[in-house]
Amino acid sequence: MSSISVLEDVYDVIEDRKENAVEGSYVCSLLKHDKGMDKILEKIGEESTEVILAAKNGQKDRIIEESCDLFFHMLVMLSANNITLDEISAEMKGRRH
């Protein structure tokens, strides 16, 4: 399985949870939170800080763990804003020189 396909699989689950709420789902709790988008963005801020601190301290395992958390919350934010991974991919490809 390629690196990007794992992200696509996670994104697909997030999209499914957005359309088909599941009791006790963390994704659903983020998407339906009383704070709305602010809750998702708070999590992105929190995870970003944790990645930065892990990198500053040279903690490879923590960098990996916290990066996964950050990627996950970014995927939730993208889904909540109806932005697809294809759109992100197209933008990234357009930046290649």
Image (tube, rainbow, N blue to C red):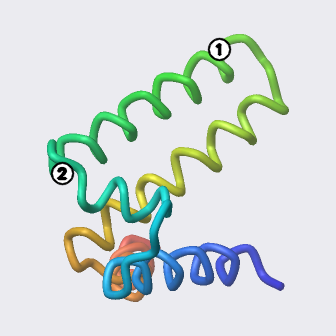
Task: Tell me which corner region of the image, top left, top right, bottom left or bottom right, holds residue 61.
Answer: top right
User: Mark 1 to mark 2: distance in Å?
Assistant: 29 Å
Identify the residue at horizontal 57%, vertical 82% (top origin).
8
Q: Secondary structure at mark 2?
A: helix
Q: Residue furthest top?
A: 57
Q: What amino acid type should be assigned to the residue bearing mark 1?
A: Lys
Image coordinates for residue 58, horizontal then vertical, percent: 78, 18
Identify the residue at horizontal 38%, vertical 71% (top origin).
95
Q: Nearer the viewer, mark 1 or mark 2?
A: 2
Which numbered circle lies on residue 56? 1
Image coordinates for residue 13, horizontal then vertical, percent: 53, 80
Q: Residue furthest front?
A: 23
Identify the residue at horizontal 20%, vertical 70% (top origin).
81
Left or right position of 12 against 33: right
Image coordinates for residue 59, horizontal then vertical, percent: 80, 21
Q: What amino acid type should be assigned to the residue bearing mark 2?
A: Met
- Label 2: few (<14), some or many (≥20) within 10 Å? some
Which numbered circle lies on residue 71? none
Up-down relation of residue 61 to residue 90 (above or below):
above
Q: Secondary structure at mark 1?
A: helix
Of residues 52 and 38, the one drawn nearer to the viewer in this rendering? 38
Comes first in the chain, label 1 or label 2: 2
Left or right position of 39 against 29: left
Which part of the image, by quadrant, shows the N terminus?
Answer: bottom right
Image coordinates for residue 93, horizontal then vertical, percent: 44, 80
Up-down relation of residue 92 to residue 29 (above or below):
below
Which residue is denoted by mark 2 in the rendering? 37
Q: Are marks 1 and 2 in contact (CB under 8 Å)?
A: no
Of residues 68 and 32, the one drawn nearer to the viewer in this rendering? 32
